Every structure is written in C-alpha cells, then in structure tokens.
Image (cartoon, rainbow, N blue to C red):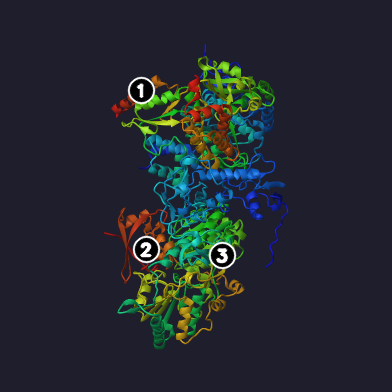
Amino acid sequence: MPLSAVACQKIDKAIAKYPVGRKQSAVMAALTIVQEERGWLSPESLREVAEYLGMPPVAVYEVASFYTMYHLKPVGRYVLTLCTNLPCSLQGSDVAARHLQETLKIGWNETTPDGMFTLLQGECMGACQEAPVMLTGHQRMCCKMMPPQIDALLAQLRDEAAQKERQE
Amino acid sequence: MTAFLDYGSDAVLMARLTGDNWRIEDYVARGGYEALKAILTAGTPPDQVLAEIKLSALRGRGGAGFPTGMKWGFMPRGAPEKYVVCNADEGEPGTFKDRDILRFNPHSVIEGMAIAAYVMGCACGYIYIHGEIWDVYERCEEAIEEARAAGVIGQRIMGSDFSFELFNHHGFGAYICGEETALLESLEGKKGQSRYKPPFPANVGLYGKPTTINNVETLACVPLILRNGGQWFLDLGRPNAGGTKIFSVSGDVERPGNYELRLGAPFAKLLEMAGGVRGGRKLKAVIPGGSSSPVLPGAIMMETDLDYDSIAKAGSMMGSGAVIVMDETRCMVRSLMRLSEFYHEESCGQCTPCREGTGWLAHIIHRIEHGEGRPGDVDALDRVAHNIMGRTICALGDAAAMPVRSFVKHFRDEFEYHIEHHRCQVADHV
Amino acid sequence: MSEIVIDKSGWLNLQINGKPVQMPPGSTVMEAAQEIKEFIPHFCYHKKLSLAASCRMCLVQVEKFPKPVPACATPVSEGMKVWTRSEIALAAQQSVMEFLLINHPLDCPICDQGGECQLQDMAVGYGKGTSQYRENKRVVPGKEMGPLVSAAEMSRCIQCTRCVRFGDEIAGQMELGMIYRGDRAQITPFINDTVESELSGNMIDLCPVGALTSKPFRYQARTWELSRRKSVSPHDALGANLIVQLRRNQVVRVQPLENEAVNECWLSDRDRFSYEALNSEARLTKPLVKKDGVLIEADWQEALPLAAARLKNIMERDGCESLGVLISPHATLEEATLLSRLMRALGCDNIDHRLRQQDFSHAFQPSQVPWLGMPIADVSKLKAALFVGSFLRHDQPLLAARVRQAARRGAVISSLHSMPSDWMLPLAHEKVVAPSQVASALAALVVAAHREAKVEQTLPTALQGITPSVADAAMVRSLLNTPERSAIFLGSFAQQHSEAALLHTLAQRLAEYTKVTFGVLPEAANSVGAALAGAQPQKNGLNARAMLEQPRKAYVLLHTEVPFDVAQGSTARAAMEQADFVLSLSPFRPSEESALPDIVLPIAPFTETSGTFINMEGRAQSFYGVAPPLGETRPGWRVIAALAGLLGQPFTEMEPDEVRASCVPSADSVTARLSNRIDSVLSTLPQAAEKTIERVAGVPIYHADPLVRRATSLQCTPLAASPKAAMNAALAARLGLVKGRMVRITQGKNATEALLFWVCDDRLPTNTVRFDMAHPLTAGFDVCGEFHLEAAS
C-alpha cells in the first residue's frame, strides 16, 4: 500500500523544514504521520518511508524502534500511556495504574479484546504539576488522572468511538 | 479583571501570563520583540549584545548551568552555515517549566532565538520539542507562523540584513534527546545517541556545522536581559548566577507547580509557596534538581538556598530546578526503583557502562524492593554506580548513578532493612 | 629506493607510560600508543572505521583530566602524559570488562570464536576471576543474515557496532543496524532482509566476539587445529592477499592477510568463500578420457600420452595453425608462460587469454601490457575519476571499496556506461547511453575537454561538429580541478565492447586533454600476467575471437570452460563440437552445460600449486601450494612440462623455484612493459546503428571463473541468482511483457534459447536490454550476435 497523497503532502511539508539534501531529518515526522494514518508501523510502512526519504530501511527501523512512541506492532484504537515515573507515582499514578488495569482487564503493553484500548507505561511527560499524567493517542494530555477521571475518560472515548462508527 | 497565573512575586519571565495571552499581539503588548527591534534598528554589533549577556551572568537553565555568554562566544565567526537550537526536550523527571514557557509565552523563546542567531550569525534554528507534549508542539507551530507573518523571523527581518528561519522539530519519546548531542543526532533523523566530545557542537554540530544548543528558559531570558540590561538581570540573582529561575515542584506538596524565584532564595520559601508538605506530614527527602541530581535529606534541604553553589555545597545540584519532594511515608527503595527503572529504560545503549550498568542497577533494586535482596546488594549498588560514573559518553551514566549513590548514602538503613526483613521499613513506622 | 623523509615539524610530543612519542596534530592517543607498540585494549575502535568511542574499553588516564578518557577518541596534545596501566586506567578498564561480561554468555567451549576471541583474550588480561552479577543474562534472538554470515548467537554481541559501521562506510550499504535501545539494543538487518553485500564476510573478521561467524566454516574446526598459510586470491585483478587455513590438509577457511597496498585488511566474499569449490564434488581426482561420447576416468599413463599423440597427429596432419589455445586469465603466470612457450615452440601462435574481448583492432605493441595506470593504493586518494563502462562493484569489489573511500573524502566520481551504476557510492555525474552510443557519448566528453582545458592542438576532424552538453562539460571539469590526482578508467564493458579500440582511443584522448591518469581495469587475477607471459598472438596468430570464428581442428583449454569463459558462447560451443580434439586442463569435471572436451587433465587449483599472479598494478605475487593436490591432480605447470616432453619440446626447469625464476619477469621489466598508450588516428566515428534492440552483458560476480561457479555458499546468495532481463517500461510494453511473465530470448542458427524473468528498470537506455553472461542460462549466447526477444507464452 503506497503512502497516501495526504501523508506525502504532510511529509513534504516536514522535509521543507530542513536544508536541501537533509531529507533524513524528516524521518521522525514521516513516521509519526504514517503511524497516525495507519495506527502502527508495519515493516512495509517502514520500507515506504525509507524509500520516500532515500534512507536504508534498517536506518528507519533503528529510528522507529528507538523512540518509544512508535508502534511496531498493531495497537488498539486508543493508546493510553500512563506516566509511572517518580513524581507521578508520588501523586497517585500507582493507584491510577491499578485502576486502569482492573477496569480494562489488561496489563501493560496489552490491548483490550475489543481492540479499543492499549495500555502503556510511560516515562516523564514533563507535566508533573498535573500528575498523574496520561496521554491518549500520544497527542492528548490528560491531567490529574485518578480513578474518577479515568472512568470519565474511558466512557468518553468509548462514546467517541461509537459515534464515529455510527457516522461511518 | 484578568486572572494571572501565579508564579510568585519574583516572577519576571512568567509575569502577567494568563494562560491565554500567548499570542504575538499579547507578547508585543508586554514589550515583546522590542529588544530584537532595538538591536536590528540600531544595528547593534553582535559583540555588544554578547557583552550584555555576559554581564547578566545568565547560566544555562537546562541542567548544566554553563554560562550562556561564554557558550555563544565559542561559535566560530565567519562560518557560512551555523545553527542555533532550542532544547525543548524537557523529560527530566520532575521538570515541567519549559512546557509552561512554550505554551504560555512562546514568543519569548522565539525572540530569544532570533537574538541568539543574530549574535552568533546563524541563519537557521530549530526548536526540538519533547514528544509527549503534542499540544505544545502545535502551539509552537502556530507561534512560529505568527512570528513569520509579523516579519520577526524570516528573510531580512525588519528591513535589516539579518535573516533567520526557525522551525519546530517534534521528538517522539526518548529522554536521551535532552542531551544536546543526542538531540542533534535526532534532529538529523537518527537514533538519539550522544556523540563523543570533542569535537563540541560549537565546532561540529548539526549537519557537522557549528551549532549552539540552549534550553528554553535560557533563551526566554535573553529578551528580558536586553530590554532591562544585563546589570538588572544580574542583580536579580547571585553574583555568578544572574536572574530568576523557574522551579518545578512536584511530589508530596499541597500545590505542585512552577514557581519563579530569584536565584539564591531559600528552599523553605519555595516549599512554602508550594503549600508545604502535603497533609502536614514531615519532610523526608528532596531531590532538588531533577531526577538525576543526588537526593538530600529534608533537614539538609531546609537549610539550603536555591542557587548553583549553595545546592552544590549541600551535596547535590541545581540541575533543571525540578524539586521532587518526598514526605515521611515514602519508601526510599521504592522511590529509587522508579528512577532506576527510568534510566534503564532510557539508556540509549551505545556505551557499555551505561547500557549494562543501568540494567544491573535496576535489577538489584527491583529485587530488594520485592523482598529478594541479598547481603552485599547495597555495596554492589554503590560499586556498580561508581563504575558507571565518569566512564560513559554522555551524562546519562552519571545521571543514573548519582541517585543510586545518594539514596544509598543517605538512606542506607532502609535498604538494609528491606534486604534483611524482605519488606519495607517505612510501613512499620507510618 | 630512496628513503621517505617525513617532515615532523609541527608534530606534537607526548608520553605514554613514560615513553616519548611524536605524532602529527589530529592524531589520537590510540594511534600514538600503536606507534610505540603500547597496547590499549579496545573493541569498537577499528583503524578503518569511524570512531564510536562506545565500548569504553580503551579508557586511559591522562594528566590533568579529571576522568579517564577513551584513547581512541582523545586527540593528542603537546606535553600530554598518558598512562594506560595506572591504577585509574586499570580500574576503568576492569569495570568496563565486567560490564561487558555480565550479559555475555560464558559458553566459550562451544563458541566458534573460542581461541580467537578478542573478548576472551581481554577478559583474561583485564577481567576478574569472579563477578558479583547474580541476575539473569540477556537472551537475544539469532538473526538470519543469509548463507555466508551466521548471526545465530546474537546473545554474544557486545554492541560494538563495527559491523554496522562497516556496512555503512566500507561496503556502502547500511544493511545492519542497531535497533531498540539500552540493554535491549540488537544488531539486525531490516525485518526479513539478509545481508547481501559482496563484502559481507569482513563483518565476521570485524566482530570481536562470536556473534557474527562464518556460516560455511561454522563448527568445522577449532582455531587451534588450523594451520595457516599465505596465498593470493585467484579471482579479480586486485590480487587480495590471503591466509588460507587448513585442517587435515583441507582448506576450511580463508581470511585476509593484511596488505595496505593491495587489499588493506579486507576480502571480497568471492575471495573469502570460493574455497568451498576446492573441496567440492566437482573436483577431478583422475584424468578423464572421452570414450563413446562419455568422459571416463583414466590413468595419467593413459591420458597424458594420448593427449600428446592426438595433438601431434593433428599438427602433423593439418599444421600447427590448426590448433587454438585458450588460456584463462585466472591461470597462473607459470602455467600461462609454459603453455605459451610450448605452443610457440611447436610453431603455433594461436594463443589468447582475452577470452571475453570482441574487438582486437587496438594498435597495441605485442609486448605492451594494459594496466591500472597507477598504484592500487592511490585509487583511495583520487580527487576525481571517470569510469567508462565499468561493472566496478562486481568486477573489482575491493577497488570499488577504495573508490568509495575516495568518494567519502569528497572525490567526484563519474560514470559513462550503458547501465545505471550500483556501486553503493554517490556518483556526481552519470551518463547512461545505449551500447552503440557509448563512443559518441565519450567523443562528446573529449570535445568538452578540448574546450574546457583550452587545448591548443586542433580537434581531430572526426570529432568536429560534436556539441557537448552542459553535463558533459561539468563531468570534464571535475577532472580538471586536480588532474594529478584524477583518472579515467576503462572497465570491462568498454574493453569487451565491439568498439573497444575506438573507446580506448577516445578515453586516451580525453585523458591527454585533461592531463589525468589513464587506466585500464584488467579483468582477472592474472590478466596482466598472462599478457606479460605472451599468452596472446605475438606474430600473426589468431586472437581468441578469430580462433572460434575460424574453427580449429584442435583446441587446448587451460582453466577455460566453454561456453562460460568466452564472449562467443554459441560460436565457441560449435567450434569445440566440430574440432577433432579438445584437450582441457582443469581442476574440475566439466559442468553439464559445457562443451565436452575429449580429454581432461586434472590440474591443481591455486591452493595446490606454486604460482604467481600479476595484479592490475603490475605487482607480481608468488605463492606456494598450501595443500597437497587432491587425488591424482597435478600442478598445471608440471602437466604442461610433461606434455612438452612428450611433444619433443622438453623444458629444462623442473623444480618450482626454477620455473618461477624462469617465468616471473623482474619488476623493472614489468614496469617497462606496462602501458595503455596506443598510437592510432581517430578516424571517422561509426554511425549509430539502426534502432534494433541492443544488449548489455556483465559477468555476474559469482559466475566469473570456474572456481567461484562451484562455490556452494556463494551460489546461494542473491548476487548469484539467475540473470534477469532488465529493460525500461517502453521496451517492455513494445514487447508486450506483463508482470510475472517471462521473456524468451533466442539467437542464431544454433537456436540458442533462454527463458528469463524480466525486470523493469527505467534508468536503462531506450531499446537496451541487460542480461548477463557466464551463467548456465545465458552462457550459450554470443554476446555480440543479434538476438530476438519476445514475451514467453
């Protein structure tokens, strides 16, 4: 499956940020764009990005496996990343973690059977004043995530998904 | 009446911010871009600007505290291609100041970068933004668009000969990219693996060209210094460390958050601003400069002032100004385990002592915490940490080792108790 | 030889362990230590690779430095004092060694690297007897890297990244990377890819532990059981120096013998893994004699006199000119010399080693020997080079590596060819034209050079009226910047072109105008030696092509397999079939596809005979047999001598050293004969042919000679795969080719036919199809003959 026109357009925009001949600098952006479109980065996706940027595929693989926010395996519709680092843990992330695991009935790095949620353990997101911090889909930062807030968020995400499905 | 965000009465960098007044017109209304305009209109020689920065005794706010003026002075003159890079990869556990600057006052950083570029003769700059703060990246994209539209960055800025292009680069989850050479590698589209120095970035940096990397807060200080004078900034702080500093307070306090204080203010004042220890509990320990800095017992910390030298004298470091507060109910083994797991996770893996040592440390601490500690483990921790320190390519090795050595030094009995009794001492006490 | 005087002004003085040493600025502590033979332990450091400074094994103490520093990455400075074995240095080294070992399996007794493992050696020197490490060791899954490199034991990897850097920097293709991070970091190819570089075996040498090992050698022997002997690679004209390793008289491994002037510390995979053919089933152990159309084993006592008698009969009956002698350029100098001498003594001048050449109209002097035109080592230092018609990476893989090094240092490399390059290096200028257009494209460069270099001498009439393009001018200008360090090379495609003499003349003229070195890239290990040996017509003898086109009554083949080793596959097969007698001297049983000789005399491959190869720079490299001849195999020179005796032309030299002395010319006499210069007038350029379909044919790297064609592991690599017909989309469309279908290629009266898969490559010129020669599927074609292409039904 070749990269979509929209993806190419976005990648081109990223490439334009760097000097001529430095296309490789856009690899992180390109991977982000493709992951956003396809949910995860399959070997074919990595190869396509490599081709687009004129990089050896293994160099793209290195990058995609080095940065933790890229997924080299399929993930659920919503990726929930809870920070469990010290400041968050001092402010309740252990409780949040337990609540998430019990509610979703999955452990770290697992996906709910309905394919809705994948649960990841994250490191410091640089927002410790609002701990415990959780990211959804790597983009939306949810703050002070104690059990009531978590329940509300999960419900909201489920609604959102249901609504989208109805639209489709 | 607009409600201002409360960073404390010392605030200059974060003064008059509401959370919504981040746009360029708001920034200009606060006196923003005046410094850049003054320089470009008058054609102030770069050396004169540099002298002002040197006078201010501004030191790097990212953690190392290196004098900014001196760093800028390292850039070779005349090289045709040079870069200035803003390190906004704020991932040091406990640190969250740059996020606030970028989302609430992004133009202060853009103006700071433009001035830095003017001084060092750079035509291009990048802001490398921490992967987990997508909303901040989007805001910075918008802010740069505003700046470009307003003609404060771009070609022939304000009709002068000075041109400067600026772009955001979004990280994607690697603490190590906060290390400046790892950041450059990442910016080049590679894994974030630190480079061996020498050569230093000022000579061989981004794309092999001379490059200076400054922290967000450092760059945000620059317009203030030039607007109010280096002496003014110097007078805010201590003789060899001018200005104010944003401290990120997290952990067991009533009001975790960012507080801007003059350098040299007592820690007690900061703790008070943060509402004191949560629930009226006793202060047990403080990590004063981000997770990499050595932990200090609360009693020592209460006697310490917040500036580079005072904290160093107390046995730790100012670092990024991230203050993690722990109260009497906290288990030091468990706390250290979280930190050691973090460094194990974040080690880039290229150099041997860090790659192997961070895993080794994490395994031992994990065992101790889970009641599987063995006699000799505490000494092993200290020895392994010692063997990492000073032997790695970049500072991550030391960053992983220092917490271990300091936790063991100050709270050895808790570790021994865990090993001997296979459970936590704190639980018995509290 | 005058002694080289080095100007040491400006050098820096330092002390290592109290010993003074002087180094040029920019050197490192590691280099300084090596200069005075002070050993500093290291893993990631390698003199030919970029610095990683990551293993930290080379930490040393330096005066005034607060921390130990890596010797490999620390520049020397004036007055520096270094201690490599002080308490501080040793403590650092020991701690690094402990870190390296905590996750390294302690399975040395079953590890293939055992006995030659740098980690093992240094653990003995720098490790402690015990470790406090009580955790589980890391397990890293093995990787599949193809038939040559085994990566089954990746838990042993110490992440030094030498293999990764080698691929990226020396081989020019980054096939391995280090994925993940921290102690999860793993060396791997891209998902489901293998390692395909023609230089991949060097990664095995570079690996300091038993993570990457030789797949063919795996579990064959322990290192201490091996005897090691020096030899020279019999493949390309570089003449890579080898250490051939034997167990119970059988070659089980080949490694490089470091020679900075030739192969540096590298080997191509062809040099390294072709030894498998030496032990293959295809080796002959007794002579073969054809009886009732079938080759049957015979005794020497029967075969040799029979061969002599048949030759004698034919010469007596039809004259000496009725013989044709085809000598492989892979034959040793001694073999080529003695056979040429014998045939000349018998009155036959129909001798040639230029088996794939088609155009012999060069005005070469008989004694003249074309060559590289410069020392091999200087290729790495080139500032600019233009390759005319070269399959560089396949023909001379290690020379390609040197060109790559030059390119990495900024050299401007250009190519004029009928194929887009796959050299794994950045080409500054590339011109791809159909074979019939190469001459005019080259002529345009000559005209551009005439203009750009403001040559006073008038342009030859034949070239007047040609207008060079902007690109032509740019390509030429790259040569003009530093002519003393620039060169033009003629590759095998240009030499085997039907207008080879014209291309040579034009390239020579281009070199004259630009004042750069003019070089020819000889095809095989002993191409230069064979020319020096007189293995080509000296008077009025027939050249290789003529010998086949004007069929002889008898042929003598030395290490030559028809049709694989000749350009005229179809013609050659017909010539062999019509001949009364074909005598083959070869280590191997004729392959199924080859024309059957009447008698095959089993002669020794390079490992079982003494011999000499003269490489592309004119360097004579002699070697001794490293193993006893297999079965009843005999050294080729000895068989030729015996034949000479039976034919009444006995040689006086009977011992290896005597033969060598009589065959190997002195260095001076070699130098005197090396020349690429021909004096010919540039007559009118031929008009471009009608728009028929033209062929480009290279020699696939693993099909180039009889030895490599039988190397089993190499034959399993993608580079040995069946040739495909490559063409651009327009031609494919015209032929009605659809994806997945095959193309049928037919030729001439002998009804040669091949069914090949086709691939689309739009970088190929119009009406040009590439399918390589020397492969069983394609060897039967005449390279220069017309052929017909159609979609296979």
Label 3 crowd (10 A; few <14 / some 14-19 / many >=20)? many
Q: CA distance from mark 1 to mark 3?
A: 75 Å
Residue A86 screen position, x and y as percent: 50, 27
To the question of a shared chain for discs 1 and 2, the answer is no
Residue under label 1, please give it: A156
Chain of the residue displaying label 2: C
What residue is at 40 percent from the left and 46 percent from the top?
C191
User: Marks 2 and 1: in contact by CB < 8 Å?
Assistant: no
Chain of the residue displaying label 3: C
Residue under label 2, please give it: C692
Q: CA distance from mark 1 to mark 2?
A: 70 Å
Task: Assign a secondary structure to mark 2.
Answer: loop
What residue is at 41 percent from the left and 26 percent from the top?
A97
Looking at numbered disc 1 in the image, what kind of residue is underneath it?
A: Gln
Task: Assign a secondary structure to mark 1.
Answer: helix
**Hey, which residue is sitting farthest left in the picture?**
C793
Pick the residue in front: C407 or C329.
Answer: C329
Task: Assign a secondary structure to mark 3.
Answer: strand
Quarter of the image with the C terminus of chain C is: bottom left
Label 1 crowd (10 A; few <14 / some 14-19 / many >=20)? few
Pick the residue in front: B167 or A124.
Answer: A124
Mark number, residue C518: 3
**Hey, which residue is sitting farthest top in the picture?**
B1
Whether residue C79 sits left or right of residue B324 in the image: it is right
Frontmost of labels 1 and 2 is 1
